[in-house]
Amino acid sequence: MENIALNWKKPILIVLLAILFWLSLQLINPVYAAAQPETLDNVVLVKFQPGLPSTERAALILEMGGQELRWIEALSTARIRLPESSASRTRDDTLALAHRSSAVRAVEFDTLVNGVPVFTEQMVDIPQAGNSTIPTVPVQVNDVDYNNSQMQVYAPRIINLPMAWNHTMGSRDIPIAILDTGILASHPEFAGRLLPGYDFVNNDADPHDDYGHGTHVAGIAAAAINNGVGMVGVCGNCSIIPVKVLNESNQGSWGNVAAGIVWSVNAGARVINLSLGGGSVPSTVEDAVRYATEHNVLIVAAAGNGRTNTPFYPAALEDVVGVAATRNDDTRWSLSNYGPFVELAAPGYAVYSTYNNLSNTYGGYIYMSGTSMAAPHVAGLAALLLSQNPNLTIAQLRELMRKTAADLGESGRDDYFGYGRIDVFAAIQAAVPPLQPNAAVGGIVWQDDNINGLQDQSERTVSDVLSIQVRDATDKLVGQAMPNGSGRWRVEKLYPGTYKVIATVLGNTLLTTPATYDIQLTNGQERTDVNFGTIQNDPVASSYRVYVPTIQGTR
């Protein structure tokens, strides 16, 4: 009888242990919105009267016994360190010290701010929700991890990014500022697109990432596209402005965040990503956000990882787009904050992106979870929209992203997903007229006398030696041509998309270049570099002569 009782209790114990284990996994490093933010007791933010002479400002700081750490010109605000003896004063005493001066509008203590990551290993494989009603064909790119199903790089597809690439892959003229722990400048995903940045933690021009959070966030927003390695960012051709406001512990001060926002605006950023936050924010940060808004710079921020509806800042500010996190099955990520301040949602669970260690398990990439990962998806979408139309206002950007988002959860806007999970393709389509058949492809056909696959100046163009077909991604024939008397061929009135260009030789002609090329055409693009080299084969020797070009490819 005793054995029967033990056998009955054992499975219940196992179930209880499993539940406890699951709960422990759900609570990995959540960042909760603290009721009282940790202050930097001897650092204050003093707002001076606009236009005050610098000598008067310096005199007051001297009277306070302080040291000016940073002057934020656009906000007429100084970040000041008081002598250590001031730490023993009460807050009211310290505030009164500056309030006695008519030169001061306001004074407040600076407080700490944190990044909001949750680290995770490779995600649990959950079937991805698909969209079977897309009328065109997704763009294929050559980024190896993106194309490797075992790497589970799900986010670009679930937000319909490959479809949006038919319209645009972004523009270097649209910079995204990443205010975070910095960026690993040597990472291949950012080559040639990093603009000068700044380190507000160490006060220098080298915003190096000594934590990894910022590099991961930057990759989600703008890792390179078609560079043959890794994954892809949402706006893979956009420029990046790295601004370090968080240290090696993923922590910083609100005063430096405010300074970083103003600096980014002045440096030409069109979008600012803030994957950081806390339970409250100094008014100086509100001033900085207002400064960005007045200069038509959109700010996107993480909603926080506390599984709470307590407002999380700066995401909860009216002029900031607050972003919640979703999973790979389009459900809510369990630790994501929620509430009226959530405007949009984006993938935040087990997101694969760049990392600041090129020698780690994934060779410079890693999986992370958090609303920190969701926000840069939205920042990248805003940058793509601006790449199409740089004249869009903040209000227009927000409206486009809201009205085209995939409605998840309760019908209409709700506190868990906001207006929905972003749909990049739908937003891009809504921002421009429908796709037009205004792309074209062409090239030349030449007599490759030295059989090297490249046209030399002495080698003539030829005609009537081959025919050319253009087929779309469904293998449908959409155009054909033959080279004219000048050796040139052209097929026009093509929609943006992926195509195969196939050459069929005539008579005793042989090709010294590939017979088939895979190409990608964007809206309005004309490619003129799909070229074919030919030689005339000796009919008698045709059974055993094989030409192998030393170099393959188009000119």
Image (cartoon, grey):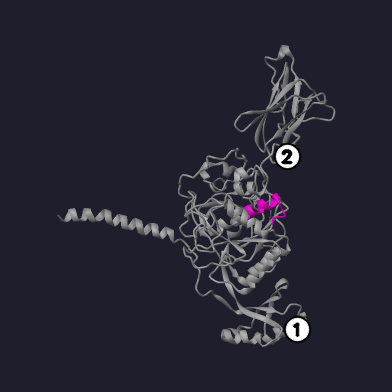
- The residue lying toward the viewer, choosing from 213 and 348, is 348
Q: Within the magenta stretch, is there residue 430?
A: no
Q: Amino acid at mark 2?
A: Gln
Q: Residue at x 74, y 82 (%)?
A: 58
Outermost residue toward the left in this view? 1
Which numbered disc flags the more N-terminal residue, 2 or 1?
Answer: 1
The reply to whether callout 2 and callout 1 are in contact (CB within 8 Å) is no
Q: Which mark is residue 8?
A: none
Q: Nearer the viewer, mark 2 or mark 1?
A: 2
The residue that disc 1 covers is 56
Q: CA distance from mark 2 to mark 1?
A: 59 Å
Q: Is residue 428 in view from this perspective?
A: yes
Residue 32: where, in percent of width, then height? 49, 67
Q: Residue at x 67, y 85 (%)?
A: 65
- Where 102 falls versus 457 (above or below)? below
- The residue lying toward the viewer, choosing from 448 and 123, is 123
The residue that disc 2 covers is 525
Residue 360: where, in percent of width, then height? 56, 52
**Quadrant for the C terminus in the image:** top right
What's the magenta region? 379-392
- Where 203 falls versus 467 (above or below)? below
Q: Residue at x 72, y 11 (%)?
A: 540
Residue 5: where, in percent of width, then height? 19, 56
